[in-house]
Image: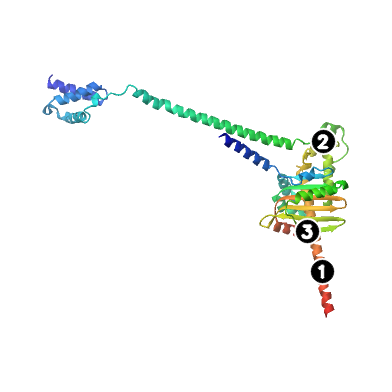
Amino acid sequence: MNKNSEINKLRFLLQRYYEAQTSPEEESLIVSLFAEIEIQDIPNDLIFDRKLFLSMRELHPLQTNLETPDDLLVKINREITEKPPIVSEVRKKKRKNFFIYTGSVAAACVLFAISVQIINKSNIIAPPIIDNLTESPSVSPEESIPKISDPLETKSVIRKSKENTSLSSPPPRINQAAAETEVVLNEESGYIEITDPEEARDILVEISKLLANNSIKTNEATHIVENTVNEYREITKSILK
Amino acid sequence: MRMIKYIICILISIVSIDCFPQRMLAEAASMKGVNSIFIGKSMLKVAGASISIGGDQSAINMSKIFNDITSIEIISCDDESNLEKLEKKCRSILSVHPFEVLTETSGDGKNIQISGVFDKTGQNLVILLIAITGNNEASFILLNGKIDIVTLNNALYAN
């Protein structure tokens, strides 16, 4: 083969090599061509390429004998594609289970709370409003709400409110009926639960009056005792004199 | 995992049960011939906020106290046949707590005893009991919650 033609071929192959279009056979041909052509015949612009290719041959003399295992690509593909889905599926399952468990626990708790509420408030007295419409004695709404004049009358107010909430004596008017629904009678504990702010306020006022009256009485009593003690001291002093 | 679930369930149940207001005199309230009232915390707050509407000075002074109270229980009975039973029942229920008598006054055939249970600091009352007996009647007013004794004193003797 002519040197020029060899160099031309070499140039052609190098061009293909740098464009990443060469096959392994062509690459080995480049190496062999560089080895065959004398160094003084190689053009200056290809000297660097020659060094590069010959050094590659020196570094990897057994490279041509290396064979990739057939199942290597399959293994790589499995690592890339198959494993992550397995992990994600497990995670998804765990998440799903977690949501199911927490959801069921939360639902159970909510149901429990609701059931307790229902049990507690199952005795809400709904006055027969239809009866109230037909039977409407002349009682004003103001009169229907018991007023406490004396602190010690608290129990009578309690009694009255309990009587009002009993089914045997339905509230006389619609307004009163609406007001009475705000009182909850818990038959199990026997308590009338006050849910009307005005009624609660009245009770608070009465309790504070009771406490205040008691403190006034206590104050008066202590003053009387102090006065008596002072008088006693004066008397004893005068006797001693 | 299942064990944790059960534990969480039990914990939540206990917490939810504990959230419901405790009623100390519930047994006495369920007795025959006994009238009883319960006022919860939320209602006390609402009522306490509007206490100035009534215009009563003693109530206005006490409004600070009512803000910290969690519940009020009122038990009363004017049925002579059940009076002794009620008194015994109330005393037995309340005997669990170390009550200290704060004041006791009597007049018009009625005896009013105010007693309370102090907390560990001795600065606050956790229960305040007003027991009114006499004239074939008995009433027990129980205030649950933190009551600062200084604030109570200031409120009572403000006038």
**Residue A74 screen position, x and y as percent:** 37, 23
Residue B109 lies left or right of residue A195; in this view the side is right
Given the image, on which type of amino acid does mark 1 rest? Asn
User: Which disc number belongs to residue A227?
Assistant: 1
Q: Are marks 3 and 1 in contact (CB under 8 Å)?
A: no
The residue lying at 82 percent from left, 33 percent from top is A129
Locate the N terminus of chain A and report the quarter of the image it occupies: top left
* Disc number lying in front (3 or 1): 3
Quadrant of the snapshot with the C terminus of chain A: bottom right
Q: Quadrant of residue A109?
A: top right
Dot 3 alpha-carbon crowd within 10 angstroms: few under 14, some 14 to 19, many 20 or more: some
Specify the subunit that label 2 lies on: A
Residue B79 x %, y %: 87, 46
Please give the residue where the numbered disc 2 appears in the rendered image.
A174
Q: Tag count in the figure?
A: 3
Q: Is residue A144 above or below residue B143?
A: above
Look at the numbered disc 3 and give the secondary structure of its residue.
strand
CB under 8 Å between callouts 3 and 2? Answer: no
Find disc 3 in the rendering and name its residue. Answer: B103
Q: Residues within 10 Å of mark 2 (few under 14, many from 20)?
A: some
Residue A83 vs residue A230, the one in the foreground: A83
Q: Amino acid at mark 3?
A: Thr
Q: In front: mark 3 or mark 2?
A: 3
Amino acid type assigned to the residue bearing label 2 in the image: Ile
Asked whether A6 or A217 is in front, the reply is A217
